[in-house]
């Protein structure tokens, strides 16, 4: 899925899809059409680069279906309980019956979610126009004290006529009940980190009219002037932000990467525009018209149930799985793995990659015998028991032959004196014989057997 794609690490992951062993029956689910467009852009850029470097034509083969996020609409269903909660919460927060409460929910982040200044300015203008007391409930959480101060100071500086209320959106009771206290929901997202956004869908399920930015997946979610209002947004001309690109050194260290991502998001958000005047018009229309709020809220609730309830979203995934299975059944594999090639070229087994490190290889020419250490009074069994008593010697036990199989090999060596690899492997099930040489390596490391590159003694 693509919950967010703006970080350097996620961009790298998208690029890796072009060289991953993907097939036509694989899919990356995009949560919005805008997220899909961004993924395609990143893939096209990387495909062009790889083509220039290798001279090969590289095309992604995976499916990119668009399936939005989902909610359990029954959780937000209105009723007597919801009405009771509304009265209790509004009284507790000092919100009068005739007052208008505007709610925003989620991370309170200047760069990673929505810069609050446009919202503050629009609500201040709304308060001036409508003459009613406005309350702004910001139910969420802050990444740090500095950001919290910016938000709290911003309310006083840019919308002094509005009563600013901050609630901890991580509290279960707030998260589940605060919807009932509101008359309007808003999310003026302007961050490139966002791809879709769940909170407007939750608000719609609760029957709230919504005022959202015409941004990313909100365009797929909210029907303008039906479920609420989508506020126009702008970005600077494409190609004018190359100096704001993620720097190449961002991948050198996680701390550098995180800082680069934050700077990248923050700078982009400073230049993404949400129309303050249009937002004020939308808030004013809803604040002054209870019938409009009811009509839009009912349409929003119906839209949420028909398009975003989990039963609908899960059905979309089930249809996707069936479609992918049908493709798998009718299409041939692209670039099937050749014999002798590692399944994961950059993660090949260490005995292949680093074979040259050792002077010798445990292969069919190796003869195995019990070592002198295993020939003392306790014998090999006593020595093995002593070795197994040390935790530093046994952490690879799950990756070796089992105890009975090891005892069988050592018993055969005790009886025969010398055996080659093939003879020792005969008593091991065929599907486990790949464990024989590594087990012998461990036994030799622990001084229990001796390995020799020599013909079998007479």
Image (spheres, grey):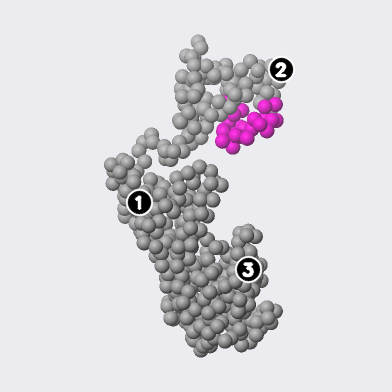
The mark nearer the N terminus, 3 or 1, is 1
Relative to 205, say whether 46 is above or below: above
Which residue occupies 49% across, 84% down? 285
Indicate the secondary structure of the residue bearing disc 3. Answer: helix
Marks 3 and 1: which is nearer the front?
3
Relative to 189, say whether 45 is above or below: above
User: In the rendered view, does 127 fall on the left or right side of 233?
Assistant: right
Residue behind mark 2: 377
In this view of the protein, can residue 300 be seen by the observer?
no
Percent position of residue 128, x then y = 55, 83
Percent position of residue 314, x then y = 47, 66
Indicate the secondary structure of the residue bearing disc 2. Answer: loop
The quarter holding residue 448 reads top right
The quarter holding residue 162 reads bottom right
Judge by depth and name the residue closer to the eye, 429 or 201: 201
The mark nearer the N terminus, 2 or 3, is 3
Judge by depth and name the residue closer to the eye, 295 or 224: 224
Label 1 crowd (10 A; few <14 / some 14-19 / many >=20)? few
Residue behind mark 1: 45
Residue 387 in the magenta stretch? The answer is yes
Discs 3, 1 touching: Cβ within 8 Å: no
User: In the rendered view, does 394 fall on the left or right side of 112?
Assistant: right
The Cα–Cα distance between marks 3 and 1, rounded to whole angstroms, is 41 Å
Residue behind mark 3: 152
In this view of the protein, can residue 131 be seen by the observer?
yes
- Rendered image: mark on residue 60: none
Which residue occupies 48% across, 28% down? 354
The mark nearer the N terminus, 2 or 1, is 1
The Cα–Cα distance between marks 2 and 3, rounded to whole angstroms, is 79 Å
Image: magenta residue range? 386-409
Indicate the secondary structure of the residue bearing disc 1. Answer: helix
Residue 382 in the magenta stretch? The answer is no
């Amino acid at each position: 899925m693509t919950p967010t794609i703006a970080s350097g690490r996620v961009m790298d992951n998208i690029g890796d899809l072009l060289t991953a062993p993907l097939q036509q029956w694989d899919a990356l689910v995009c949560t919005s059409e805008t997220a899909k467009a961004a993924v395609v852009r990143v893939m096209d850029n990387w495909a062009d680069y790889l083509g220039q470097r290798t001279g090969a034509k590289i095309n992604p083969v995976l499916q990119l279906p668009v399936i939005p996020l989902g909610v359990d609409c029954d959780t937000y269903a209105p009723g007597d309980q919801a009405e009771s909660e509304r009265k209790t919460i509004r009284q507790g927060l000092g919100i009068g019956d005739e007052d208008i409460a505007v709610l925003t929910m989620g991370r309170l982040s200047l760069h990673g979610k929505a810069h609050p200044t446009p919202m503050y300015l629009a609500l201040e203008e709304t308060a001036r126009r409508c003459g009613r007391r406005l309350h702004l409930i910001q139910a969420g959480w802050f990444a740090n004290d500095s950001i919290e101060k910016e938000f709290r100071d911003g309310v006083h500086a840019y919308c002094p006529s509005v009563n600013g209320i901050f609630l901890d959106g991580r509290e279960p009771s707030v998260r589940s009940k605060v919807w009932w206290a509101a008359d309007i929901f808003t999310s003026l997202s302007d961050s490139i980190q966002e791809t879709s956004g769940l909170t407007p869908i939750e608000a719609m399920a609760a029957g709230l009219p919504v005022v959202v930015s015409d941004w990313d997946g909100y365009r797929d979610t909210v029907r303008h002037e039906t479920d609420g209002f989508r506020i126009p947004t702008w970005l600077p001309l494409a190609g004018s932000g190359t100096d704001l690109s993620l720097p190449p050194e961002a991948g050198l260290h996680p701390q550098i990467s995180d800082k680069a991502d934050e700077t990248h998001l923050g700078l982009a958000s400073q230049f993404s525009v949400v129309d303050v005047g249009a937002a004020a018009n939308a808030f004013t229309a809803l604040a002054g018209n209870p019938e409009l709020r009811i009509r839009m809220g009912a349409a929003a609730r119906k839209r949420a149930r028909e398009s975003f309830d989990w039963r609908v979203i899960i059905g979309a995934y089930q249809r996707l799985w069936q479609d992918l299975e049908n493709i798998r059944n009718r299409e041939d594999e692209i670039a099937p793995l050749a014999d002798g090639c590692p399944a994961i070229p950059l993660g090949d087994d260490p005995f292949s990659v680093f074979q040259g490190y050792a002077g010798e290889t445990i292969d069919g020419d190796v003869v195995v015998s019990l070592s002198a250490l295993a020939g003392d009074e306790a014998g090999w069994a006593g020595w093995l028991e002593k070795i197994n008593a040390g935790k530093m010697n046994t952490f690879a036990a799950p990756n070796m032959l089992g105890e009975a199989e090891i005892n069988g090999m050592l018993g055969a060596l005790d009886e025969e004196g010398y055996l080659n690899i093939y003879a020792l492997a005969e008593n091991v099930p065929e599907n486990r014989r790949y464990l024989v040489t590594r087990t012998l390596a461990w036994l030799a490391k622990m001084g229990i057997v001796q390995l020799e590159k020599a013909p079998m003694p007479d």
